Image (spheres, helix red, strand yellow):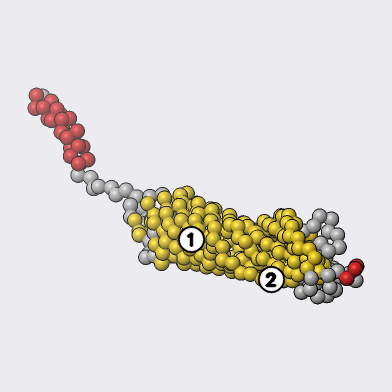
Amino acid sequence: MKRLLGALAGIALAAPLGTAVAADLRLPVKGPTMAPVAVYNWTGFYAGVNVGYSWGRDSVDIDATQRTRVFRAFGLPAETLISDITAALGGTRGRAEIDGFVGGGQIGYNWQTGAMVWGFETDIQGTGQKGGLQFCVTGGCPLGSQVVNVDHKLDWFGTFRARAGLLVDPRVLLYVTGGLAYGQVTTEASAGALGLPLVAVSTKETRVGWTIGGGIEGALSNNWTVKAEYLYMDLGAAPGATINNSTILPGVPQGGFTTVLDTTVNVGGRVRDNIFRLGLNYRFAPEAVVARY
């Protein structure tokens, strides 16, 4: 009897120990394996093309003076000068809309630091922007008033800008940009007395100003990105063109006098522009780094 009770007690004590040993001998279980993830990096050079539309305006300033000379002989201005008076005709201001399509190319470089992207970009654009307006220098435009026609065209422009942006996704960048702007403006102006042929001049000027804007850019693949961008550009004020015109007033002079009008018209302006464009860039970058977890 004592031997039976001892055997049963030994079995009871050995059972938990055997379970613990068996648990220790189980094979390790591996966790789920995650697929490798490509880490996109914006650092590197890029180049691309763009196309868009621009709606701008040229604030035109006109300042005119008129010299009136009266001679004793009909049709012979070189004869006896009776009077010579120079007077300011005053100034006037208007606005010419210069709208049109734009297109060109850009190059740049990005540095990525965490979720921030910094860089520089320069671009050159050809445009079809042009517009014009007409002035009558004298109020009411009576016969003999000086009429001025002005046409402006933005032939091309370029920018050199800094960029700074935030990654809202590893492959989507929101950015602001700003810097130097420059461009060539053609001014075609004509002036003359109302009812008489006009004297025309044409000038080309390279103007320098500034630009600011922003946009969004997204990665289509490791090397290709697409962007939408808005820029406000101010090319500053410039003197534009100067027109010198001499007119002999029509009609038979009374008492044998001839009147000659010498008019000087200065045409200046300030070009401001709004630009919206879509662009496609190619990044000269190595393959994306593959991270395994």
Q: Which residue in the protein does label 2 denote?
A: 201
- Residue 291: in sight, yes or no? yes
Q: CA distance from mark 2 to mark 1?
A: 32 Å
Residue 291 is labelled as none
Task: State the image quarter where residue 43 is shown.
Answer: bottom left
- Please tell me whether mark 2 sits on a helix, a strand or a loop: strand
Note whether 7 is above or below 168 in the view shown: above
| Residue found at the very far left of the displayed protein | 3
Position of residue 76 in the picture relative to residue 18 (left or right): right
For the residue pair 87 and 196, the one nearer the viewer reads as: 87
For the residue pair 255 and 274, the one nearer the viewer reads as: 255
Residue drawn at (23%, 48%), measured in percent from left and top? 27
For the residue pair 265 and 124, the one nearer the viewer reads as: 265
Residue drawn at (80%, 57%), measured in percent from left and top? 138
Position of residue 85 in the picture relative to residue 59 (left or right): right
Q: Position of residue 227 (x, y in %)?
A: 53, 59
Disc 2 marks a residue whose amino acid type is: Val
Position of residue 75 in the picture relative to residue 237 (left or right): right
Residue drawn at (63%, 57%), measured in percent from left and top? 270
Residue drawn at (36%, 57%), measured in percent from left and top? 36
Residue 160 is labelled as 1
